[in-house]
Structures are given as structure tokens and as C-alpha cells.
Image (spheres, rainbow, N blue to C red):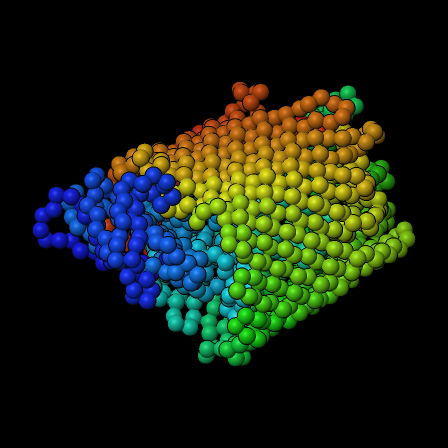
Amino acid sequence: MKKLVFIIFFTPFLSFAQTIKGKIENNKGEKILLANIIIKDSLNSEVIKEFVIARNGEYSITLQNEYKMFIVEVTAYGYTKAYFELGNLEKTGIYTRDFLLVPDDEQIEEVVIKAKNSFTIKDDTTKFNVSAYSDGTERKIEEIIKKLPGVQVNEKTGEIKYKNKSIETIKLDGDDLFGSNYSIGSRNINVGMVEQIQAIENYSDNPLLKGIEYSDKIILNLKLKKGVDVSGDIDLGNGVMAGKRFARDVGSTLLAVTKKYKAFANVSFNNIGINRTPFDYFATTSYNPEQLKERNFFAQKIIPESGFAVSLDNQRININQTLFSSYNQTFKIRKKVTIKNNFYFIRDRIASTQSTINDIRINNDFFRTVDNNFVEKKPLLYRADTDIKINSSSSSLLEFNFKIRQENIFTPTKVIQNEVKNIYTELDTKDFYAKHKIIFTKKISSSTALQILLEQADNKISQNYLLSPSLSDSISYDKDRQFVQSDKSFIEAKTVLLANTQKSKYVVSFGTSIENNFLLTRFEGIKNDIKFPLFANDITYKKIGIFQEANYMVRLNKWKFISAYRLNYLSQDLKNETKPSKIRNLIFEPSLTINRGLSDVAFLSLYYNYQQQPFSVEYFYTNPIFTSARMLQKNEVNLTFQNTHLWGTSYNHNDLYNQFLLNAGLEYSLIKGNYFSDLTIQANRTQMIYFYLPQNTSSTRAYVISEKYLHSIFLLIKYNASYMHQTYTNIVNGSDLRKNKSDIFTMNMEAKTAFNTKINLQSELHYGLFSSKNSTDAFVKNENTSYKLSLIYKPNKWSFAVLSADYFLPNLKKKEEKYYFIDFHYLLKLENKPYQFNFWFKNILNQDTFEQVQTSDYATITYRNNLIPRYFLLSVAVNL
């Protein structure tokens, strides 16, 4: 980084213009004989306002125009460019800036940019001052993180992205308390505890590998305020819901910090739809950051619990009773041993009334199915994690990681099919998961390191699904029972060599892996408590791989090339109720990424990736399984691989100084070989048979993510849009093989004012287009839109009020079916007191249901869910 040394002098005598002067030297203290001094109004502007030539290491320029802020840029042949911002200038005055220039071929070490005390960039770290992004309305640090330039937060999963890249974790003063479940910290740590948020790029979590390994990881580090040793808060919120139910939101947090010990604990309960946990039980299709990393270790959950895939915010539709507690600690024993422990407990009761209407179009026929579901979902989770790091010497590190989890989910449901038939179901799922990981790192030299890794995981899932009355034969049986036992064990050992040279870094590894999958299913009819076996599956699927991997990165001026490959000899053995199958394959998977730097803040990327993946055990059972009160599934087995080609290009422009960020990309994937569906849809039952075809399917995806702050009108604008086009094949109700095309376009735009007044505005606009077309039926589509407007009134620094109005139109063709929501929030602080009062008035219009529409190649699906009713809530927060 450019090293700038500067001194500011305000002269005591009068001056009738703004004057800048100073010295220009190199890092040896020698004067720079010739340099250019340029005055610009922004860092990346090509417009030169004024300039002067500096000779013999000195310069002085009297400005012809009057400025409130400008950039001073210094360039000299053979030296790295240097610059600095001058702001809040008086009309007259003399300002002194001395510059220290670094030769082009030497390492950059120090400060690059300072911007109005809001953030500083140093090396790979961007430091955001919390006070600069806070307006006093925020309670938890996630609310500040959302406001940082370049940051995106997933409201449902808690995932945080910085510059369109997912972060690894959130640390507290450099200590990792939370791991991948960092949303515990972001959703629960108080703003008042944090002084600074640091975004650290090219992060190495192993200190011995820093400077050796190539890393594109990003973390956030929360720098705590000085003097924070023991702090926390207590929140007590009570109110009333429509229907004379109580509304509650209570909780407490505690943070303890010493030189060798850090701990964060929290406990909370609410029934107003808030998720303060790192796990999302409201939906079944979303994964948190940790689950995304470890999902290859998970056994297949064949029967899904009821999901609630609704576009509304969970705080409108998640009718919950969530009790959550966690304890997170890290402590050091002497200087060589660090231990981290995490403990989680969750108990919840989610209730939902759902209506699903399927308008089905098949072979010029039309019919409708209607399911009304009354669902309760009762998850219970116990979990403990332990991480131990032992520095046996300055060049060696031993790491041990252990996780254990027991998760039970009980889901009773009442289903009314086609407004006639009543069906009662109970799904009891028990999920046990344990994972061990050992890593030994030996730093051989300053440029070389060796690692030995051993990883082992076990996941056992049992599911009991009772259906009454019997769906298989209501005359012969009273009810049905579907039992599924799904187990998976995985072990991998590998040796990794990491090394770097002056312009390149590479990794070479050798290893082996063994994966065992067991799937046992039984479907039984029950009469007078006597069980009669009907369908069964008994599957053993084993994979053994011997692999060699390599990754090579090289920098050539503004170019960066990253090439990688994986060579794997894979053995697949399948034993099921039909006949055993064995297949051996030698797999080669290459990838290449080319980055071209266009400026200090922008680069262009091109990439290609090829993968050969076997299918999972969920496609290997051949006898039917009831996965819901309506759905019956089975497969036609094939062990052939799925081949995927992925091409893509992206442009990234991240100019934090000018608060302009633009990430745009285009991807094309071609998949050869896939399991397609043969659907038979009837009024009371749907049967799905998955079968393999060596046909091609493709998808094209384009996206734009942008953010710009317009200083002149005090307006922040965020714009996100994505488009996806897919082709695929299926069979529906005995049709010929149908070729389908689908298009999905979504757009979100947010605008927020930053006037220095008591009133500001914030608006959000969403638009979605879903369309589908197949080779036999007509083109169908659905368009939806929503708009939110918030009026923010802040009469002083001790109070504020927010009035919000939401408008939803699920189907643009049915403009009469629209929804309105109005919410109000008022906050009051007591001056110099650790108290804070909040009053919420949610869903003032008391909307009780919400509807959304989706389309597919054979149906238009209308979902209707009940909502959290209108409620008043008054809370008192006390900072400890």
C-alpha cells in the first residue's frame, strides 16, 4: 500500500486563497527531482481541475478555484502513485502535505484511502467506523452491517456477502467465536459494543499459511470498544395480538472479554416471527453458510418436512414460538493452546394454515386439485462444537474440530383434499450428526508448508410417517406407515503441499475417500394395529475414491491466471432389491479462471469449469415411497455420471471511496445426463418416477448488482436484477417426451435519502416474471410486483419514528387481488441512561392471509398462507 506521511499546518495569518505545499521524497529520504501534482474532485475522475510540476522534491500550488473537498494526486516516473483527500476546507488557508513515494517494484505497505472518517483501506482490510453508518436507530450489529457499502445480507439465512462474495465468519477482536454460524453474532451483538467493522480480504484462517496459500476468503472482524470487559443487555417485550393472544419478545445477551478469554451468551424467546438463530426451520429449501459447506456429509432426508416458501418477510408469516439459547467461548491456555466451544439449544413450534391450488394443463386437458393443510412443525435441537488449536512450535500447528448434533422434528398435519377428503399425517424425524476433523500443518520454510488432513462424518436419519386413513387401500387398512432409515458415513485422508514463488502460488494434494450410504424403507398398511408389509427398499451404496488435485495461480502484471484440476479414480458399488451394480471410472475435472485488472478498483473475469458427478442415493430406490399425503415417488436406477460444463464472465467494479459498486455477470451451463420426471397427476394422488436420460439440459444466467451514493442529492440507490433461462425434459400423464423452456426474471431496487433533516424516506421496489413454455401447450407466465415506502422521522438523537407501507400484487393480471400492510415503530432513549423503549404496531390493517402464484410447464400453482395478526408490542431494553 502507498505510504503517505503528512502534516497539517493552519497558518495564523490571513490568506486570500487555498494553498497546498510540501515535500516529495522516496523511501530512502532522497528528493524526487520531478513529479506531477494533480487536483481532482474524486479518486477515479479523469478530469484534472488544476496541476503543478514539483521540482527538486518541493511543490507549492495556489488554487484558482474554491473547494470544500478535493483529491491531491502525485505521480513520478518509476514510483507508485500516491494520493490523499482534503476535506472540510476553509475558504482561505495554507495546507502542508509531505509525500513519501515507493518505487514500483517494492511492496506496498500502508494506507491507501481515507474517506471522511467513515472507512479506511489498509492492505487487504477495509475498516468501517460504526458511528459513521449509525443513525441511532440500530440495536443489533447486523443492522449496521446491512448499511455498509458492498454488503448484502440474506434476511432468511443470515448469510453475509461482501463484494458479492460470501464471508467465512465474523470474529470478535480477532477471535473466532462463531465459525460458520456467525449469524449468532450478527443478529444478537449490540451496536453499542462495537467501534469498528473490518472487512478482511484474502484471509488465511491458518496463520502458518499466510503469504503461502492463495486465498480469496473474506471475513468480518468486529473491533470492540475500549473498556468493554463485561457487557450485555436485557430486552423485555410484551404486547397483545388480534384474537386476544399475547405477543412476546424477550431476551438477554452477555459478552465477557479478557486478555485470554472471550465469551458470548444469549437466550431469547419470541412469537412474532423473528429468527435470531443460525438455522431456518420455517423453510425447508434454504441452507445457512455452514450447511452449504457440509451438505456433502449429510444423509438424504427422503421425506421433507412441511415448508413455507413464501416471498413475504418471515416476520409476517412465521407464526412461531421460538426459544433459542447459545453459549460461545474461546480461551487460551498459556500461549500454545486455544480452545473454542459452542453450545446451541432450539425449541420451536411453527403453525401454518396453507392452501395450494393446482390448475393443471396437460395434453389440452385442464383440471384442478386443492389441498388445505393445517400444519404444526415442532423442531428440537441440541448441539455442541469444539475446536482445539495447539502450536507445538513456531512452525507447526495441530487443529482438532468436533461437532455433534441431535435434531428432532415432529410435524402433525391435517390435509383436506379437494375440499372433501380429510387426511391426518404425523412425520417424526430424528437426525443425528457427528463430524471430526484433524489438520496438522508444518511450515517447512517461508514459502512452503505441508498439511495432513483427516476428516470423518456420520449422519443417521430415521423418519416415521403415519397417514390416516390409508392411502394405499382404505378398505383393507385403517392407516399407512412409511418408515425411512437413511445413514451416511464419510472418511477422507489427504496430504497437501503448498508453496509460493515471487509471482505464483500452487497447491498439490493426494488423498483417498470412502463414502457409505444405507437406505432402508418400509411401507406398511395397518389394520387393528397389525402391520402388513407392502413396499420396501434395502440399498447399500458405496463410493471409494483415490484422487490427486492441483491448483496453480500466477500473476503477470495486470493478469491473474488460476488453473486447477482433480484426477479421481472412483469406484461405485450399488446393492439394492433388484441386482447389484458396479462401475469404475477415471474422472478428470479441470477449471480455469482468468482475471484482468482494469484499474485499482475494477477487474474482468473469465472462467470455465468441468465436473463429473455421480448421483446420490435418493435416485437409487425402485419401490415406491410416500413423501407426502399426495406424492408417491420411485426411480429407474442408473449409475452413469452427470457431466457439467460451466462458462462464465463477470465484471467487478468496487469503488468504496466514491460509493459506487457494480458486479455484473453472464453464465452458461450445459449438463449432459440427468434424471427426468415422469409425472402421473390424478385428483387425489401424484406419482413421480425419476428416470435417467443422456440428454442435454442447459441454463443461461445473467445478473447485475449495483450500488451508488449520489452525494449531490444525498441519495443511496441499490439495484439488483437477475435473469435465468432453462431448458429441460419431462413426461406428464403419459405424454411424449416434452421439451420445456422456462424464464425467470427478478428485479429489486432500493432508494434511501440521507438528508440532514428530521425526515428521510426509504423505498423498495420488486418485480418478478415467471414464464414457461413446452412443445405441446401454450405459453404461460406470471408477473408480480411489490413496493414498500418508509417515512423516517428523527426529531432528535434520542428518538425516532418509522411509518412503513407495503403493497403486494401477486398477479398483475388480477389487480383486484392486492395486499396492503402498514407498520409503525417508535424508539425513545433516555439521555445518559442505559434504557431504551420501543413500541411496535405491526400489521395495522390486520391482513390475515397472503397469496402468491407460481408457474411451471404443466401447472399454475396458487399458494395461500395465514399471517401473523395485528399486534402491539412495548419493549424495554436495559444495557448492562
Left or right: 365 in relation to 59: right
User: Relative to residue 91, is residue 397 depicted above or below?
Assistant: below
Q: Quadrant of residue 841?
A: top left
Residue 789 lies, in percent from the top left, at: 41, 31
Q: Is residue 491 visible?
A: no
Residue found farthest to the right: 579
Residue 742 lies, in percent from the top left, at: 67, 31
Residue 443 lies, in percent from the top left, at: 56, 74
Q: Residue at x 63, y 25 (%)?
A: 781
Left or right: 4 in relation to 689: left
Q: Residue at x 10, y 53 (%)?
A: 12
Q: Compare residues 365 and 244 and report the one nearer the observer.
A: 365
Q: Residue at x 74, y 51 (%)?
A: 613
Q: Compare residues 766 and 115 and report the one nearer the observer.
A: 115
Q: Residue at x 31, y 50 (%)?
A: 36
Q: How many numbered markers are drawn? A: 0
Q: Is residue 785 visible?
A: yes
Question: If the image is split into quadrants, where does the C terminus sit?
Answer: bottom left
Residue 397 lies, in percent from the top left, at: 55, 74
Q: Quadrant of residue 769?
A: top right
Left or right: 660 in relation to 566: left
Question: If the image is split into quadrants, where does the N terminus sit?
Answer: bottom left
